[in-house]
Image (cartoon, rainbow, N blue to C red):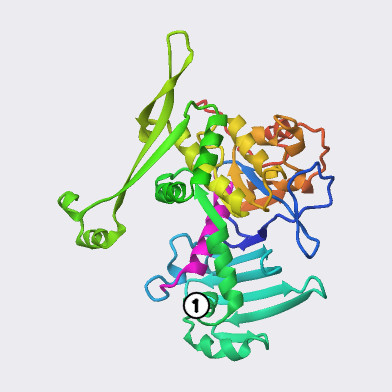
Amino acid sequence: MIIDFTIKNYRSFKETANISLLAEPLKNDGIAISTTDFKDDILPVAGIFGQNAGGKSNIIKALSCMIDSMLNTDHVGSPINRHPLLQPFLLNTDNSSQPIHFELSLWDKDTVSQYNYGFEVDNSGVVSEWLSIVDRPKTNRRSRMIFERSGNKFTFDSTVKGDLEPLSRRVLGTALAVNVFANLADPYSHKLLEIVKEQIKIIDSTDIDELRRYILERCIIDEKLRMQVINFINKADIGINDIFIDKSEVSVAELPAGIPEELKRAMSNGAGFSYRVESSHFIYDNSGNKLTESRNFNFGNESLGTQKIFILAVVLLDALNKGEVVVVDELGSSLHPFLTKRIVEIFQNPELNKYGAQLIFTSHETFLLAKNSLNGKLDLRRDQIWFADKGAGEASVLRCLSEYKTKKEYDLAKRYLEGRFGAVPVIKSWEA
């Protein structure tokens, strides 16, 4: 579970920005708050709202960039300072040469530990890096700095020094030590990478093609999940009663001319597959009565919104089953506001979110701010609502609604659109 995430000098964010999922001491209406063994309460949902170019998506990009860098094993071919998403704040002469700062805190219920990891990187490579562990909740809370790095100089906790100190000489200046240590000796680094790889899913909902293969494979492997997705789609009232997926291997002989040799070799080793996806719709008589027959269609002919519902349903329901974290950029894109609201309510509902799954999203959908819209008990709390806004010098700032004086009965959507919390565009007149 994500406790908080901090960035500084990243893309549109000049100063420090922190998004926290630690619950503030507010009255809880019964949402699915998880309590750690340290008695910390962690929220199931955080929503980031704001104008275009306010910085919402850059928070998601920052998390994606951090995780990609942590999992990267090609330290020579893909050095960290060449990551395509790695960019400092460029609208200030000082910041462009300063390091970018990332820091992530996670709670892991399996090891009953909190992992605090971060690094700073500039054009030349890694400037600093650190990993600390907080454990022993049942005896006395213990915090240990497993390793700390400044350039190519390391310090280690006494429990790991014998194993990690010799390995530190293998760490390149353009590589993260956590990846080297995880693959060779350190169980703490290994567990941290396992958490971010297996438990955090990041979705750019404007690009569904990248997710398609993963989604289809999950439905083929897990029939229970597929049925859950069908049930979700049925409740979404989009007219589909079933989805069929057929996977077949593509032979090299079937490939069209001009396919690169590298791809042909990969497919000859069993990496080439094609998927046929069909959606099933009931047939009706002239009076509108549903018949027992149904008709299948190529799923690619369904609307973009319907395809996104299917993809989101697989990832979100899978996360609920496993207690994972899903991060979605533009959650409401191509979806009806009622459906977007329902997705948020599912993660808020303790009866449906039994394993501590989390949803972090960006959105323009103000209906998510409305009170008592569908199920008032599952509305977003003040500490779950964040605003990304433009500040001085076009630098983004991130604020939580709990920083403002508001009352529970306030119409937050109306007040937000009135500009009471910032993060809305000031549109000039179109007149000549």
Residue located 72% across and 32% down the image: 375
Image position of 290 with respect to 26: above or below: above
Give the camera-side residue of 322 and 207: 322
**Residue 70 as seen in the image, left or right of residue 338:** left
Give the camera-side residue of 125 and 108: 108
Location of residue 266 by image quarter: bottom left
Location of residue 423 by image quarter: top right
**What element does badge 1 sit on?**
helix
Name of the residue lying farthest toward the front: 292
Q: Position of residue 73 (x, y in %)?
A: 44, 72
Q: Position of residue 143 (x, y in %)?
A: 74, 76
Image position of 35 with respect to 367: above or below: below
Asked if residue 275 can be seen in this view, the reply is yes
Location of residue 129 by image quarter: bottom right
Quarter of the rendering occupied by the N terminus:
bottom right
- The crowd level at tag 1 (other Cα within 10 Å; few <14, some 14-19, many 20+) is few
Name of the residue lying farthest toward the top: 287
Asked if residue 99 can be seen in this view, the reply is no
Q: Position of residue 118 (x, y in %)?
A: 61, 70
Give the camera-side residue of 392 and 80: 80
Give the camera-side residue of 384 and 232: 232
Main SS of residues in magenta: helix
**Residue 281 as seen in the image, left or right of residue 265:** right
Q: Amino acid at mark 1?
A: Asn
What is the count of numbered marks? 1
Q: Position of residue 269 (x, y in %)?
A: 27, 63
Is-magenta flag for residue 342?
no
Image position of 168 with respect to 55: above or below: below
Residues shaded magenta = 53-74
Look at mark 1 in the image and give the residue it sits on: 183
